[in-house]
Image (cartoon, rainbow, N blue to C red):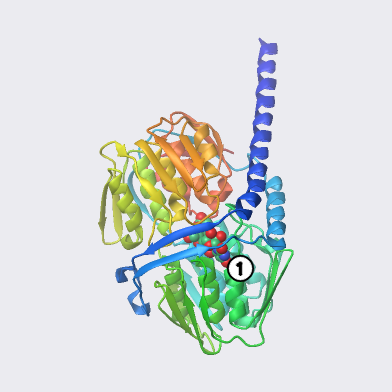
Amino acid sequence: MKEQKSKNAKEQKSKNAKERKSERAYRIIWIMGQADAVATNKQKSERVYNIDNHNIDNNLIGDSRKGNNQIDNEQIEIREGDYKRQNMLEEEIMRMPKKSDRIIINGELPLCGNISISGAKNAAVAVIPAALLVDGWCRIENVPQISDVEILKSIVSEMGAKVEVEDSNTLYIDASNIHSHVATYEMVKDLRASYYLLGALLGRLGSAEVYPPGGCDFGFRPIDQHIKGFEALGAVVTESDGIVVANASNLVGAIVYLDIVSVGATLNLMMAAVKAQGTTIIENAAKEPHVVDVANFLNAMGANIRGAGTDRIRIKGVEKLPGKASYTIIPDQIEAGTFMIAAAATGGDVCVRNIIPKHMESLGAKLTEMGLSVTFNGDWIRVKRERPLKSANIKTMPYPGFPTDLQPQVSALLTQADGTSTVTEGIWINRFKYIYELNKMGARIKVEGKKALIRGATPLEGARVDACDLRAGAAIVIAGMMAKGVTELTGVRFIERGYEDFVSKLNSLGADIRYDG
Ligand code: EPU
């Protein structure tokens, strides 16, 4: 009996080791595959904009345009820096601890009740670097407690800013005495949004040196549009080993047409231009809610930015940003969407509170199309599942289109819809890695290029799975909550990058999720 037990234990150990090895091999092959995918990629995305002024902060409306905007993004050139960034990413993944951050999910429990949404991650990770542009203090409220924010707090304090935590979600930052323009590899290695330090430091000090960003990995993440914008303002930018160095004795306003709608390039340029001489115009700007939020923050500190939320942003340079003001970050559109989808997926009834309903329209429309009851009011939205789900076709697009950051979560939901659904990724080259994990749980999803074909409804079963990136992690948690039996999810650190108290919030709605160890 004892011998049999020890034999079983040995077999299990070797099976686990094999699984780990094949998972790791899969991850590396996947990354290597990116090079080919990018080299041959002709990204052609047709982006149809229908700007509705209700989307936009009325104080900031400059020129709003209606119409079609077709972007033909020619073959993306892979530069040496991109390969080096990719190599660093592979090394990073090899070093990642396995099984050190695991949660256990007991599935099949409907989520019910009320949940309050935290401040927007993607606004916070830009507002904190933007605080470096302020010549005095600023107070930032509704800052989510997530690991990306923790990293940024320590980066800006290493640069000489005084950072005080006034309460769990309020930061006081005084950047009067910043002394460094360098963000080293050690400082930024776990952070995608490190590129905002480029625009902020360039705008404040006239020079910036920033190591390549880490963060979520779904294909090459070029920053050519950021660089093009800085150069248009008069900066000299060099890139070597992935390290970007930008210097300008004098930044002068210019008209910059972005070849691709980029949230990061729009925000970075905005930061670099805020104190430039004269006026900068960003054409084909991103219109995401956090672009408007960062513009509002900078204006509250003394900047002169108009048109954020439209595709034409005008920035009149000012000499100083005096600051001495408080600013409250908007609620997180993606966190809200994740809870709406989780409610739908588990057959629940959840009221998602403290949101801006306008930001949730594209998701609300799709959930309604799938047969869910979705009601909006004031600052909340209620999602209730009363009947079987219908299949849907979804394509991710820049705002106000369906957000790419909800693509994995909605794909998990669509595994429960009758018929075949398609989900087309319109922003990133490869954001389907999580599908391997969902299929391990019994989903029937096939990826063809930028399209996932999802056959449903498929019962899911608990499995040992890995959160390969932030939103993938959220999608797998949703799948685990729908699945029969127990799901063991590793890579929870990815989820903690962007969701405040995700596990405890879900438990408060009736989920059964616990940290393992
Ligand atoms: N792109 C270029 N050149 C550039 C910049 C971007 O080709 O210079 C391409 C990208 O490769 C991508 C597309 O343009 O194909 C859009 O990229 P964008 O610059 O808009 O993305 P980002 O600023 O790097 C932010 C969010 C992402 C979100 C995207 C799209 C932050 C910190 N990150 O990334 O959020 O997916 O916008 O909305 O704001 C997440 O929260 O999970 C996340 C990944």
Q: Which residue is mark 1?
A: 224
Among all residues in the image, which is located at the extreme top? 1
Please state the horizontal and vertical placement of residue 102, each as a whole percent of the image: 57, 40
Q: Let me know if residue 25 appears in the view.
A: yes
Q: Where 470 sits versus 462, above or below?
A: below
Please state the horizontal and vertical placement of residue 367, each as a whole percent of the image: 32, 48
Please state the horizontal and vertical placement of residue 306, each as a whole percent of the image: 41, 80
- Please name whichever residue, 33 or 302, is drawn nearer the observer in this view of the structure: 33
Q: Residue at x 60, y 85 (%)?
A: 251
Question: What amino acid is labelled 1 in the image?
Answer: Asp
Q: Where 149 sits versus 227, above or below?
A: above
On-image quarter of the N terminus: top right
Q: Residue at x 67, y 70 (%)?
A: 158
Q: Residue at x 71, y 55 (%)?
A: 88
Q: Residue at x 44, y 78 (%)?
A: 313
Q: Let me know if residue 182 appears in the view.
A: no
Please state the horizontal and vertical placement of residue 418, each as a whole percent of the image: 33, 35
- Please name whichever residue, 15 or 254, is drawn nearer the observer in this view of the structure: 254
- Please name whichever residue, 383 or 387, is drawn nearer the observer in this view of the structure: 387
Crowd band around label 1 with a 10 angstrom C-alpha radius: few (<14), some (14–19), many (20+):
some
On-image quarter of the C terminus: top right
Q: Is residue 388 left or right of residue 97?
A: left
Q: Is residue 260 left or right of residue 243?
A: left
Helix, strand, or loop for circle 1? helix
Q: Is residue 279 left or right of residue 207?
A: left
Q: Kindly tell me whether mark 1's CB lies below 8 Å from ligand 1.
A: yes
